[in-house]
Image (spheres, grey):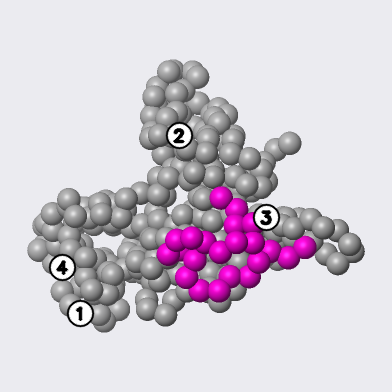
Amino acid sequence: MSSRNNQERFGSGLEGKPLGSPADAGSQTPPQPAGNSGLSFVVPTEVVEIPSKGIFYPEGHPLCGSEAIEIKHMTAKEEDILTSKTLLKKGLALDRMIQSIVVDKSINTANLLSGDRNAIMMAARASAYGEDYTASISCPSCGEQQSHEFNLSEISCLPLDRHESLENVSKLPNNNFEILLPRTGVKVEVKVMTGKDEKELLKMVEKRKREKLSESMLTQQMSIYIVAVNGDTNKITINKFIQIMPAFDSRYMRTIYKTITPDIDSTQEFTCEFCDHVAELEVPFTTEFFWPKS
């Protein structure tokens, strides 16, 4: 992966000027001076390239056809949001932070696609605390725990045409995808998940924990993004199929789903300092991501 700085990856700050690309569709609010006490400092903004390129949003959506979104740089206000015990307990801290930094307030940030939210969070973190991110990593070979530094400037958007090279996959007019499962021959229609869907998944997982039931993250996630089985949209039918789906088809669908979903490429090379094992790891999203150690 070629190394690009944050300005090249996500665009430059607007500095009060409108975007000169399709990404500037719709009105955008210029950044306001910080406070009214005579300070002339204006919170900078930047344009973030979104993995979906606006293709997956319906007509009339502020991001429909837009390749980027404008965000303001994080301030102490957003740090308050990210450290709020109430918001953290309710699982709302990230949602509120994203809502706070997105400039166009007509955008319902809860309905942003997951990959677009990931791009926003990476850009926000890089502009706030720098592009170097040190995280604790467990070597996938020897298991030794160690610190590893990731470079957020190397993160880029995955190409949207990845599904075109895949067999048994077709893109539907409603921007969903249809996957033909190899073992059962069943046609499964899947949608791209949003932040709202992620929140629903979290609620389902927490409910099972409270009821002291076994974890079922894979099947619960499938129940959210599978919207039809052989054309049948009935949720009962979908959930019954998920429970009896052969493991081969389940793994196949999950692999395909990860490939077709608009997202960022955050994989970077890791070399273990203990056993010299080399692996490609995704940038981990830990508590240090938005609260790095001094």
Task: Reply above or below: 245 against 124.
Answer: below
Check disc 2 and give the amino acid type.
Ser
Q: Secondary structure at mark 1?
A: loop
Check disc 1 and give the amino acid type.
Asp
Tell me the magenta residue range.
Answer: 12-33
Q: Which residue is mark 1?
A: 232
Q: Residues within 10 Å of mark 4 (few under 14, many from 20)?
A: some
Q: Which residue is mark 2?
A: 3
| Image coords of residue 290 (percent x, y) | 64, 48
Q: Secondary structure at mark 4?
A: strand
Q: Is there any visible trace of residue 100 in the rendered image?
A: no
Q: Secondary structure at mark 2?
A: loop
Q: Which mark is residue 151?
A: none
| Image coords of residue 79 (percent x, y) | 72, 55
Q: Which residue is mark 3?
A: 44
Q: Is there any visible trace of residue 128 in the rendered image?
A: yes
Q: Earlier in the sequence, mark 1 or mark 2?
A: 2
Viewer-closest of 245 and 271: 271
> Does residue 21 show up magenta in the picture?
yes
Q: Is residue 230 left or right of residue 257?
A: left
Check disc 3 and give the amino acid type.
Pro
Quadrant position of the N terminus in the picture: top left
In the figure, residue 45 lies in which quadrant?
A: bottom right
Contact, mark 3 vs mark 4 (Cβ under 8 Å): no
Q: Report, in whole angstroms, how far the alpha carbon at label 3 lies from the one at label 1.
A: 48 Å
Contact, mark 3 vs mark 1 (Cβ under 8 Å): no
Q: Which residue is mark 4?
A: 187
| Image coords of residue 263 (percent x, y) | 39, 54
Q: Earlier in the sequence, mark 4 or mark 1?
A: 4
Q: Report, in whole angstroms, how far the alpha carbon at label 2 lies from the one at label 4.
A: 39 Å
